[in-house]
Amino acid sequence: MDKRYAALSMGEQLMLRKQAIDDVLEHPEWTLQQSVRHLKRSMRLTSAELAKMAGINARTLLDIEQGRSTGTVQTLNAILGVLGLKLGVVKAQK
């Protein structure tokens, strides 16, 4: 957890994660960059911590957060998977 914040109980951490998920789902207009940044900040994680949890390189996460990369579907699924979310593509209905 980001050392700028006081330690939280497990219940408080779970509440933050649930709120972060709800926020992202309520704002489909957010870019992936905005969503990733919001998730990280809401859960009070550093980029290095979130990258480690997702199993990706910290530089990759920073590039996505700062808009230098859009990331791959695989990378974004690794990041979102930390919260039990998954990015998907569905066939449009005609």
Image (cartoon, helix red, strand yellow):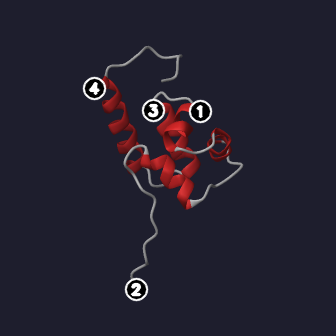
Compared across the picture, whether 59 is left or right of 18 comes to right
Looking at the image, residue 84 lies above or below residue 16: below
3 vs 1, front mark: 1
Q: Tell me residue 53's x, y (percent).
A: 49, 38
- Element marked by disc 3: helix
Other residues around mark 3 within 10 Å, as few (<14) / some (14–19) / many (≥20): some
Residue receiving disc 3: 42
Instruction: State the mark number for residue 48.
Output: 1
Residue receiving disc 4: 11
Q: Residue furthest right?
A: 68
Q: Say which residue appears at 54% left-offset and 60% top-offset.
A: 73
* Contact? badges 3 and 2 (CB < 8 Å): no
* Contact? badges 3 and 1 (CB < 8 Å): no
Q: Tell me residue 76's x, y (percent).
A: 53, 53
2 vs 1, front mark: 1
3 vs 2, front mark: 3
Compared across the picture, whether 11 is left or right of 57 comes to left
